[in-house]
Image (cartoon, rainbow, N blue to C red):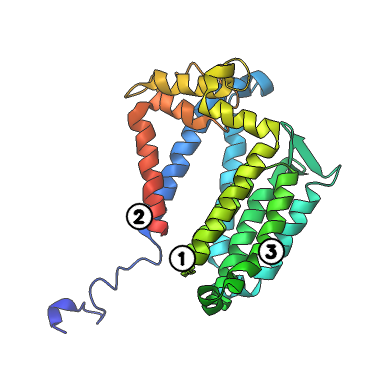
Amino acid sequence: MTSSSVSMSGVPFGKQWQLPFDGVLLMTVLLLLTVGTVCMTSASTEIADGNYRNEFFHLKRHLVYLTVGMLAALFTLAIPMRLYREMSWLALGIGFVLLVLVLVPGIGRDVNGSTRWIGLGGFNIQASEIAKLSMVIYTASYLVRHLEEVRTRYSGFLKPVVFLGVFVFLLLLEPDFGAAVVMMSAFMAMMFLAGVRASHFFFSIVVCLLGVAAIAVSQPYRMARLQAFLDPWQDQFGSGYQLIQALIAIGRGDWFGVGLGNSMQKLYYLPEAHTDFVFAILAEEMGTVGAMGVLVLFAVFAWRAL
């Protein structure tokens, strides 16, 4: 090693300035948090003023959640990876208990026809979100402990599927079809990255797709939502109303938007404008350029995470 490649302290250049985290990933997350906070605030001012006589009501709640989330992130970073492996069964048990508790009358809260929340004073916990994390932790631990069996025998692939099936069944009882699909997708992605045999993987994918299709057509309201998604104009003042209003918001944004805070659709035209459809308000106020910028941030987030 030449003297030009070594610092005065004897540490090779490039190593002495190495960060203990991914700087690009961290900046991407902070940018997404900032954009999300600004857009949620803009989309919620009218409804907050109408419901609570405080146009910044939802912003204050959002900042509380952000603070709790950041503290939880710092706590999570301090936990050694081996503890995740050792406590994976505990995580799985917590997820299972929450999914059961949310179905117990008096504990689970019904919101818009689905029982997905557990009330804790002024806060609500969505059981499915913790259950998804629990399943990811358990699956990761299982893959580390049984990687050779997963790669060589179908039994190694099927064992964790039993727990996945239980979780998906409980989610469908809420019902939370979307969370069930996300959980199955995450599970299959982890199996794929672990190197499961292609024949085992694609056979399971076909089975999952057939199962999802069967679940989707088994309930009339699910078929109605699917049809409304494919052609919202069939029932523009009923099941397709929300999607049409979101499309109107995106269309009004054009290339550069109508300006931050100037959305018309958030004035009670678009239901759930500050929650499920906040991206439509973002597209209306910041235009195609702003919306594409957010999509690029998510792409960078996925790239750096992988």
SS of the residue under disc 2: helix
Residue 171 visible here: yes
* 58 displayed left or right of 35: right
Q: Earlier in the sequence, mark 1 or mark 2?
A: 2
Nearer-N-terminus badge (3/1): 3
Q: Secondary structure at mark 1?
A: helix
Circle 3 or circle 1, nearest the eye:
1
Place residue 290 in its image quadrant.
Answer: top left
Q: Which mark is residue 24?
A: 2
Tell me the CA gap for discs 1 and 2: 33 Å
- Whole-percent x and y of residue 8? 21, 79
Residue 102 versus residue 219 in the image, above or below? below
Residue 212 in the image: state x and y as whole percent: 61, 46
Q: Is residue 161 above or below residue 25?
A: below
Residue 273 appears in the figure: no
Mark 2 is on which residue type? Val
Residue at the spot x=38%, y=61% of the render?
A: 22
Please name the amino acid that badge 1 sits on: Ala
Q: Which mark is residue 198?
A: 1
> Mark 3 — residue?
162
Q: Secondary structure at mark 3?
A: helix
Q: Which mark lies nearer to you, 1 or 2?
A: 1
29 on left or right of 80: left
- Quadrant containing the N terminus is bottom left
What amino acid does circle 3 point to? Val
Give the residue drawn at x 56%, y 59%: 204
Q: Are marks 3 and 2 in contact (CB under 8 Å)?
A: no
Foreground mark, 3 or 2, reads 3
